[in-house]
Amino acid sequence: MALRADDPGRGPHVLVVGDSVIYQASADLVMTFDWTSNVEVQGRPGFRTDQLVPVALQAVADGDHEFVVVLTGYNDITQEVDTAAAVADMVEVVATVPCAIWVLLPTKGDYPPEAAVAFNDRVEDLVAERDQIHIETGWRGAADATDGPEPDPRLVSDDGVHPTDEGTAEIAEVIEAAVSRTCR
């Protein structure tokens, strides 16, 4: 799903790229960015990072995005596909904009926690030398804020991956705050 609110007179262009988690948060994302009307959300259910790279590449090429946000990895892990090269490719795509945010995955969910940790570590290693790409841990911290091995049930649905309504609002708030704090 591509959701775009476009008003050239009101604010910088923000692109958010991700899978079904971002798809579910689309409306909340557009509403939460109250300081710009130029928000494009590219949420693609079932897509892995390797499938999202062309989506991001096309969106960046077609737009004048000052800020790009990426949240990928859920399907990479659940589909058990090695997307290491694609993660590096996505880093290259988002490195072409003035400021980018990569939102790390929660480590608690319906997938092996060590796979999420490895995915997040790979992302952090790849962006370490990129001054314009910033790591955001707020969604991971919120979803992982439980004593047990399950994610916070207020934020993550029973399937252990997809956000609840409260979770989509939290994702949008985390992303907007990260862009405001880091990129504006």
Image (spheres, rainbow, N blue to C red):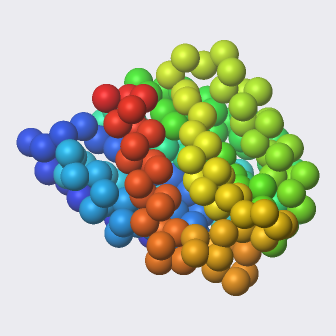
Which residue is rendered at x = 65% and y = 76% of the image?
Answer: 153
Spot occupied by residue 107 in the image (x, y as percentages of width and height): 78, 55
> Farthest residue toward the left?
9
- 49 to the left or right of 17: right
User: Where residue 161 sits in the image (x, y, percent)?
Assistant: 69, 71
Indicate the quadrant containing the N terminus: top left, top right, bottom left or bottom right.
bottom left
> Which quadrant of the structure image shows residue 125?
top right
Name the residue: 66% across, 26% down: 127
Q: Position of residue 43 (x, y in %)?
A: 50, 63
Give percent across and percent down for residue 33: 29, 51
Relative depth, front residue between 166 and 8: 166
**Residue in the image at 50% along x and 22% along y:** 132
Q: How many marks?
A: 0
What is the quadrant of residue 14 in the picture? top left
Q: Residue at x 9, y 42 (%)?
A: 9
In the rendered view, does 34 fall on the left or right side of 111?
left
Q: Nearer the viewer, residue 75 or 162?
A: 162
Q: Tell me if I can see residue 81 in this picture.
A: no
Which of the image's four quarters has the C terminus?
top left
In front of the other: 181 or 15: 181
Query: Can residue 6 be seen from the camera position used here?
Result: yes
